[in-house]
């Protein structure tokens, strides 16, 4: 299937050329809502099932999905905030209604057999439109604590696929199926040697991969920068920092790198984003220092990479902390709350973990016990119930 991208303003005829469609995937905004859909789409296409994706204009899915060769259509979307913000008015009055109307028009043109919602507010109008058109909806929840979009979307879902058993009873038990969280297949093919060559790493020095998610994490960026002289004394770092002009973190980190002694500066690599090279980085990393979003946690568990998680505070239900604690409870990670994150504490934790390579490797194996390697197959099995 050749890649096609469109906007909600595209002609109905252009959309109809994509039919027949077995599965429309809807979701995005973050990597955690995008990666599972990409994994499922790859398996669907392997099995000669057709699919298309409805996402936002500016979310991470708008870049990743077309690159993977999946037909992509963007719609307007809004966000339901629990605090006052001027954008709430524009979203509720303009963007949300426009997204719903566009989703209905696109679904009528594509005529899918089933809609697969991966989460994020862009999925809501698509799931609502599917319900109006009597198209079955399958929802996937990646986190231990369901977000608002999925809790609302669950009302329209025939099946609700969850990563972890729904012990809290957030969803109707009769519609819940435990599938795990799929991993993009390309991440399993990472080569340590390719990462060493690409980033000019020293194979004798442990590699620490630092990431705050696609947009970076300001607090983690600043603490790593402050701790840099001590960190590079014991490890090499690849630091995915985002490129937020409001914080200026990327430029500040580059300046911190320049201030290092020449013999240590080469041990620190700053990158705003990580793409195809992520597979090699995971293969080479001795330790990951990261936020605890569903996507990152799933990748580390699936690949058996030990992690030091600094969960993002303030999310509903503190979902990142719950994600991280799940891994910590099986011995697969260490959790460092942001309130306790200082340069000194970060150096101490990293040094302690790297000091015992055998224990670190065992931590990765413990993390792997939470992974469901055939999660994509399980979800595709649920979807194809509605395709045959």
Image: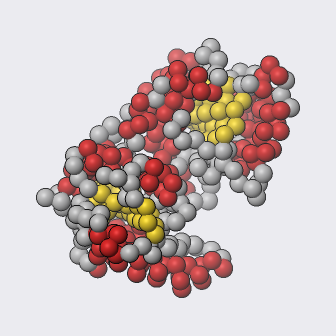
Relative depth, front residue between 355 and 90:
90
| Residue 282 x/y as whole percent | 52, 31
Residue farthest along the bottom direction in this orientation: 93
Q: Is residue 111 left or right of residue 30?
A: left
- Residue at 56% from the left image edge and 26% from the top image edge: 195
How is colour applied across the structure in the image? secondary structure
- Give how far across and how far down residue 369 sits, in percent: 38, 33
Q: For the point 26% across and 56% down, which residue is it? A: 50
Q: Residue at x 33, y 46 (%)?
A: 42
Q: Nearer the viewer, residue 27 or 152?
A: 27
Residue 305 visible from this viewpoint = no
| Image location of residue 137, percent across then percent down | 28, 66
Q: Please identify the quarter of the rendering in which residue 258 is found.
A: top right
- Which of the two residues, 362 or 288, is positioned nearer the viewer here? 288
Is 110 displayed left or right of 350 in the figure? Answer: left
Tag count in the figure? 0
Residue 40: image location, x then y, percent: 33, 49
The residue lying furthest to the top in this view is 204
Is 280 located above or below residue 177 in the figure?
above
Q: In the image, 358: left or right of 172? A: right
Q: On the rendered image, what quadrant is the C terminus found in?
A: bottom left
- Picture residue at 22% right of the left edge, 46% below the top: 47
Towards the viewer: 296 or 97:
97
Residue 90 appears in the picture as rendered: yes
Q: Is residue 349 above or below residue 249?
A: above
């Amino acid at each position: 299937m050749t890649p096609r991208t469109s906007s909600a303003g595209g002609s109905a005829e252009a959309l109809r050329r994509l039919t027949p469609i077995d599965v429309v995937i809807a979701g995005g905004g973050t990597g955690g809502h995008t990666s599972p859909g990409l994994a499922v789409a790859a398996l669907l296409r392997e099995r000669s099932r057709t699919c298309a994706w409805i996402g936002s204009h500016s979310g991470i899915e708008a870049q990743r999905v077309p690159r993977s060769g999946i037909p992509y259509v963007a719609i307007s979307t809004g966000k339901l905030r629990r605090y006052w913000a001027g954008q709430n008015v524009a979203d509720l009055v303009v963007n949300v209604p426009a997204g719903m109307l566009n989703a209905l028009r696109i679904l009528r043109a594509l005529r899918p057999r089933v809609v697969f919602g991966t989460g994020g507010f862009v999925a809501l109008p698509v799931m609502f439109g599917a319900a109006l058109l009597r198209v079955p909806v399958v929802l996937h929840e990646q986190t231990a604590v369901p977000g608002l979009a999925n809790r609302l979307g669950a009302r329209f879902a025939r099946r609700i696929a969850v990563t972890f058993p729904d012990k809290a009873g957030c969803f109707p038990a009769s519609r819940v199926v435990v599938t795990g969280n799929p991993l993009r297949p390309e991440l399993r093919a990472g080569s340590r040697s390719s990462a060493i060559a690409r980033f000019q790493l020293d194979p004798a020095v442990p590699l620490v991969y630092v990431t705050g998610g696609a947009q970076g994490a300001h607090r983690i960026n600043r603490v790593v920068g402050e701790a840099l002289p001590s960190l590079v004394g014991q490890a090499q770092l690849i630091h995915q920092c985002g490129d937020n002009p409001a914080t200026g973190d990327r430029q500040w980190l580059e300046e911190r790198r320049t201030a290092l002694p020449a013999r240590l500066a080469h041990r620190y690599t700053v990158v705003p984003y990580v793409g195809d090279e992520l597979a090699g980085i995971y293969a080479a990393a001795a330790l990951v220092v990261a936020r605890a979003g569903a996507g990152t946690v799933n990748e580390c568990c699936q690949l058996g990479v030990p992690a030091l998680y600094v969960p993002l505070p303030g999310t509903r239900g503190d979902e990142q902390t719950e994600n991280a604690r799940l891994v910590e409870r099986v011995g697969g990670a260490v959790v460092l709350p942001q309130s306790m994150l200082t340069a000194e504490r970060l150096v101490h934790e990293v040094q302690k973990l790297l000091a015992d390579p055998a224990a670190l490797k065992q931590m990765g194996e413990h993390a792997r016990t939470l992974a469901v390697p055939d999660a994509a197959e399980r979800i595709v099995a649920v979807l194809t119930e509605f395709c045959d």
